Image (cartoon, helix red, strand yellow):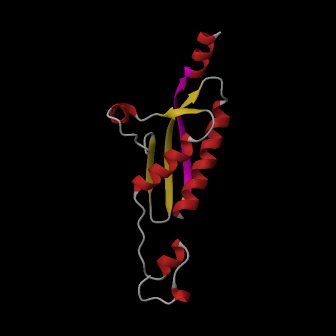
Amino acid sequence: MIGMSEEQVPTSVETLESAGAGIKISEEVVKIIAGIAASEVDGVAGMSGGLVGGITEILGRKNLSRGVKVQVGEKEAALDIFVIVQYGRSIPTVAQEIQEKVRQAVESMTGLRVVEVNVHVQGVSFGHAHSEEVES
């Protein structure tokens, strides 16, 4: 930071705040982090973004925050994740893994404390099971 000696340079969000630097993390940033973390969970076929998300994907722009709603306070965040699960996967197991991965990603990257991650299963994808039937 300009005007600070090496010993004065803050090393974390809390230290930056105590040094007088205000930090505001955008809801969009938290949405993107959560969306990427959730979509990487094995068993998640996709994120459910509704009509607007579908139009965005048709136009060729991938919306990384699709299927995520957040409420961000000064030090805490609450998230709702809307997913489509692959057929044959245990929904409770996939949902629990989404909760863990999203909480870990958001907390480690933003410094916010995640107070809740609500997983909403919007559908089941039969894509992989159907393609296996066709090949047989």
Magenta-drawn stretch contains 66:
no
Q: Position of residue 72 (x, y in %)?
A: 44, 57
For residue 86, say whether it is visible: yes
Residue at screen point 54% across, 40% down: 39
The magenta stretch spans which residues? 114-127
| Quadrant of the snapshot with the N terminus | bottom left
Residue at screen point 63% across, 48% down: 100
For residue 112, say whether it is visible: no
Q: Which quadrant would residue 105 be assigned to in this image?
A: bottom right
| Quadrant of the snapshot with the C terminus | top right
Q: Position of residue 124 (x, y in %)?
A: 55, 24
100 vs 22: above or below: above
Residue at screen point 49% across, 77% down: 16
The answer to whether residue 94 is left or right of residue 17 is right
Q: Position of residue 4 (x, y in %)?
A: 46, 88
In the foreground, 22 or 115: 22
6 vs 80: above or below: below
Q: Position of residue 3 (x, y in %)?
A: 42, 89
In the foreground, 60 or 70: 60
Residue at screen point 43% across, 45% down: 65
In the foreground, 73 or 93: 93
73 vs 28: above or below: below
Q: For the stretch drawn in magenta, what is the main secondary structure?
A: strand
Number of numbered discs on residues:
0
State the residue lying farthest toward the front. Answer: 135
